[in-house]
Amino acid sequence: MTETSSEAIPHGLYEDMLALLTGTMLVALGLVLYTHAGLITGSSAGLALLIQYVTGYGFGAVFFVINLPFYYLAVKRMGWPFALRTFAAVALISALSRLTPEWIGIAHVEPLYAAVAGGGLMGMGLLILFRHRAGLGGFNILALYLQDNYGIRAGYFQLAVDLSILVVSLFYLDWTKVALSVAGAAVLNLIIAINHRPGRYVGMS
């Protein structure tokens, strides 16, 4: 019988860079599907989308600004390497969310498909970022901190935050779009809750 080692093997710099690019591209594509369908998501990205729908300001700039206050917690509680990777991920999302619609054209997307596929893409993107000790700022930083220090599942905490944002969006969006957004949030967070567990993956950066 072959023995398997439980010792964590650190990721190399090139692996972290590829993970940042891959993860943010998946999240950006999911956000494009959500935007075309008029859906909302949770966390700081959801808040930025809601502000975009209400005010017309671009998602990328709003998303970048919203995350600025959370970097203090990232540095203090998670360390400079995590904070720098997260800052890079947020900057990439801000740029890719603007550039992706110029690179692909979507004439039509069913809202149900956008909710499920978009939620899945964002969930997989976040999972990649989490496993390389990065996040997308905001409540993702708080979710990782609570999981690492208090054993609270990042996915379940994020789901509670996301649902709170979705409830607020009822005052601004059609309830059918909000209902589909809830389904998408469930897909996103279940992917994280099922796959991002302590001891299940021992890679580290």
Image (spheres, helix red, strand yellow):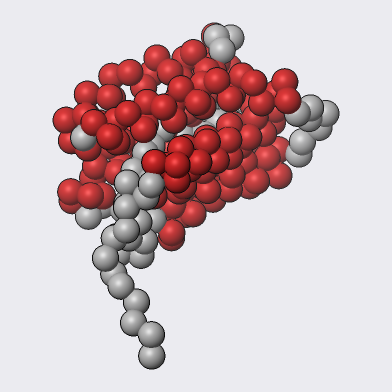
Residue 99: image location, x then y, percent:
64, 21
- Compared to residue 10, the image places residue 6 above or below, namely below
The residue located at (30%, 64%) in the rendering is: 199
Residue 10: image location, x then y, percent:
32, 52
The residue located at (29%, 69%) in the rendering is: 6
> Is 179 in front, or is 4?
4
- Compared to residue 62, the image places residue 138 above or below, namely below
Question: Considering the image in quadrants, where does the N terminus appear?
Answer: bottom left
Q: Quadrant of residue 82?
A: top left
Q: How many numbered badges does the structure rendering display?
A: 0
From where the camera sits, is residue 64 visible?
A: yes
> Is 78 in front, or is 139?
78
The residue located at (47%, 28%) in the rendering is: 45
Residue 135: image location, x then y, percent:
38, 37
The residue located at (38%, 18%) in the rendering is: 66
Residue 37: image location, x then y, percent:
69, 31
Q: Taking 13 as reference, is 55 left or right?
A: right
> Is 167 in front, or is 103?
103
Q: Taking 35 as reference, is 150 left or right?
A: left
**Residue placed farthest to the bottom in the image?**
1
> Is 168 in front, or is 16?
16
From where the camera sits, is residue 163 visible?
A: no
